[in-house]
Amino acid sequence: MRHLITLLVALVSVLTVSAAGENNPVANPKAVVLSGNARFTVLTPEMIRIQYSGKQLFEDRATFAVVNRNLPVPAFTQTTENGYLTIKTSALTLRYKLGSEINPAQRNAQSLSITFRLNGRDVMWFPGKEDALNLKGTTRTLDGAIGDSKRSELEDGLLSRSGWALVDESPRTKRGDGSTTFAFDKNVDGIEWFAEPVDKDAIDWYFMGYGHRYKTALADFTKVAGKMPMPPLYILGYWYSKYQRYTAQDFMNIANEIQANKIPLDVMIFDMDWHTKGWTGWTWDKSIIPDPEGLIKFMHDKQLKVGLNLHPADGVDDDEEYFQDMVRDMRMPADTKVVPWQLEDSTFYRVMFRNILRKREAQGVDFWWLDWQQNLTNPRVAGLGETFWCNHVFYNDMRLNRKDHRPVIFHRWGGLGSHRYPIGFSGDSFTTFGTLAFEPYFTSTASNVCFGYWGHDLGGHQQFDGNDPELYLRWCQYGVFTPVFRTHATNWEGIERRIWKYDNFSSLLKTVNLRYALMPYIYNAARMAYDTGISICRPLYYDSPEDNNAYRFEDEYMFGSDILVAPVVSRSGKDGRASRTTWLPEGRWFDVCRNQLIDGGKTFTDSYALEEIPYFYKAGSIIVNYPHVFNLKSRPETLVLKVVPGKDGKMAYYEDNGDDEGYKNNEYTTTDLIQTRTDDGVTLKIMPRVGAFAGMPELRSYQAEFLCEDKPAQVVVNGTVLAADGWSYNAATRTVTVVLSKVGFEKMNVITLKKA
C-alpha cells in the first residue's frame, strides 16, 4: 500500500509539472535504488539523492529547492554483499548498511558513508559530519550591517574546500530564516502551490561530491534546482531610488534634472511613501501624487521603468481603496476592519491580485519591490517562509499574467531556490568604508547558491554623519561592477543621493557612464549565468581552486568571465590616493588603470587616484562596449570592441529582445568575435550572425579598439589596405582604432593589423 501511495504521488507530480513547464521532479526509475526504508537516486556521477522514510513514503514532487530530477542516468553499479549495499559511480562510492536508520545524529560511517578522491587523497562523508570548510552562500538581509557584522549569518553554500556539500531538503530542517521546505503540488492559475510533505519526519539529502570542480557543481545544481532567469535588460541600468516622501513634482524634477545633467537612467523607484501612511499600503497618497497615471506616463515618456515598494505584512485596512471589494470577494463579515495578509490562501491570492495589484499594474507599474520586513514565517502554516512564498507567487504571477514583459521582482533572499526569482534587495546597511569593503565578498559569495543578482544600496542606507563624497564615489565605482546599479538611502535628514548635487559630480557621472559602456558585456554575462549557473560576480577560486590566494583575497572577484575587479574600499591618504594590494591569478592581464599588459601569479601594491578603479581584462579577451548612451530602451547602432592583447581569444556576443521570455526558446542571436595573434600582427574576425529574434538590427557599425599595440605598418579590412586616414592611432594610449560602418550580418568581416 505504501508503495502504491508513492506511485500515485509520482504520477500526480508528472502531470502537474508537465502542465507547468520543462522541469520534471520524478527521476528516471533506472537512476533509483530502493533498499527498505532508504532510497538513493543517482542524479549525476557526483550527486546522489539520499532519502530515508520509516513509513516508506518517498517524496517525488518538486520541493522549494529542487524542481527537476529527471536527468540523464549516469553510469553506476550496485552490489549487495556482507550486509551492505554499495553504489559506485565514476566519482563516488556510497556504502549503506542494509536495514539501518539514516540519522544525522549518529555522526559515524557505520550506517552510511560516501567516499571520493580529492587531490590524490580519499575523503569520506557520513551523516552528521560537519563541513568546517564550507565556502558559504548568502543571508536574507544586510539590514543593520556595519562592516562585516553579517558574516556570521551567511548560510552554508553548495561549495566547500572539503570537496563536498549537502543540500538538506528534509521537511524538518530549518532554513536560515527559520522556515522549512515544502513540496509543490497541483497549481493555482498556473502557479505551483505549496503542499505538506508526504512524510514530515523523512530525510531528504542531496550529496554533492564535486571536489574543487566548483563550476560543474553549480551547473549541475541548476539542472535540478532550475535555471537563473535573465532579468530584463533595463534592470541592469541605473536606478534612482531614495526613501523620501517625494511629491509628484519632486519625481518629475528629479527626472528632468537627471536628463538636464546628461545622466543615463533606466529605472525610477517610488519608495513606500507613494501610498497612504503606514508601512503597509495599497492606496495612492493623492495629497502628494494626485495623478498617478499621469506621473507614471511622464516617466514612461522619458523611457523610464517604474517600480513600487511594498511592505505587505499588515494586509489591507478598511481605509484602503478597494477594501470593500476585498471583503466581498473574501466573503468576510461586513464589519471587517482588516483583511489579513494570507498569500498562502489561493483565494486571497486571486482576490488580492485581481482587486488591487492588477489595478496598479494597469496604471503602469512595471515591477514590484517586495521590501518585506515583518514576518519571517507564516503564522497559519507552520514553517512556510513568507519571504520565499512572496517571491515565488509574485514572480510567477508576472510570468503568467504579463507575458509581454520579462518577469522580475526586487526582493530579499528566501533560501535555496530563490535564484529562480530574480532579483535581490540586500537591505539597509550602514554607510561606512567597512561595510563597502564587505560587499564584494558578500556579493560574489552569493554565487555559491546561484543567487547572482544582489542589488545593494550604493552609498549605504543609513549614515552616521554628513555626506561623504569620497565614500559615495568609491561605492558607485564598486557598483559599476555589481549585478544591479542602484543608488539609495533612508529618509534621514540630510542624506543626499542625487549625484549631481555633489562637488565630485563629474567623477560620479563617470561611474554611471562606465556602467552603460559595459552593458553589452554585462548582458552577455547574464546570459552565461542562465546557461551555466555561474553568476556575473563570482569568487576567484572558481578558476583557481588550488591557490590559497584565491580564497584570501576575498574583496576581489571576477565580473563575468574576462574582467577581474579589485575595488578600492578604503579612504585615500593625504596625497589623494588610496593604496590597495591586489593578487592576480596565473596568466596575463591587462591593467586598465595603467594601460599595460602584466603577468599574473603574483601580488602587488599600487595606489589609486579618486577616479581610478582597479580592474583587469583577461589577456586575449574581447570586451564589447556601447558608445555613450542615455537609456537602454533603444539599441545603439555601434558596438565598441576592445581587443585585449596577450593571446588568442574569442567571445560569442549575445543579443535578444531584452524584455520577453523568447530567450528561453532560442529567440536570440550570437556573433562570434575571434582574435588571432602571430608574429606578423593581429587579426580580428567578426563572424556571421547566427539565430534570430524580433526587432534584431539589420545593420551594425563596429568600432574596433586594439589596446596596447604599437603603430601598425598596415591596416587591412576584408582584404583591402586602408589609407592612412582610414584608421587612427593614439600614441599616448597605444590604441589602434578601426571603424566599420553599417555592415551586414550575413558574412564575415576581417580586420588585420600588420606589423612593420
Image (tube, grey):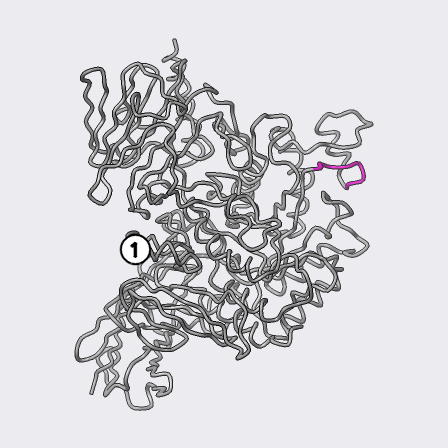
> What residue is shown at x 62% (from left), y 28% (from top)?
345
- Above or below residue 176? Residue 297 is below
**Amino acid on which disc 1 is placed:** Asp
Regarding mark 1 in the picture, which secondary structure is present there? loop
> Which residue of the protein is positioned furthest toward the top in this rendering?
1
Q: Quadrant of the N terminus?
A: top left
Give the quarter of the figure containing the C terminus: bottom left
54 within the magenta span:
no
Q: Farthest residue toward the bottom?
A: 724
Q: Is residue 467 above or below residue 46?
A: below
Q: To which quarter of the image does residue 585 belong?
A: bottom left
Question: Residue 8, how many percent across, how many down?
Answer: 40, 17
Image coordinates of residue 357 in percent, x first then y, are 66, 42
Coordinates of residue 250 in the picture (x, y in percent) = 74, 64
Decide which of 63, 601 is in the foreground and name it.
601
Q: Residue at x 33, y 80 (%)?
A: 738
Instruction: Look at 36% across and 27% down and name the residue there.
Output: 127
Please give the residue where the numbered disc 1 appears in the rendered image. Answer: 547
Q: Does residue 30 appear left or right of residue 230 in this picture?
A: left
Q: Position of residue 320 (x, y in %)?
A: 77, 41
Look at the image and give the residue range highlighted in magenta. 314-320
Foreground residue, 509 or 716? 509
Residue drawn at (30%, 35%), measured in percent from left and top?
47
For residue 238, side relative to residue 317 (left or right): left
Mark 1 neighbour density, 10 Å: few (under 14) some (14–19) many (20 or more): some
Task: Identify which residue, 443 or 263, lies in the foreground.
Answer: 443
* Residue 363 sits above or below residue 49 on the image: below
Q: How many marks?
A: 1
Task: Judge from the rendering whether residue 28 lies leftward or rightward of residue 280; answer left or right.
Answer: left
Which quadrant of the view contains residue 379?
A: top right
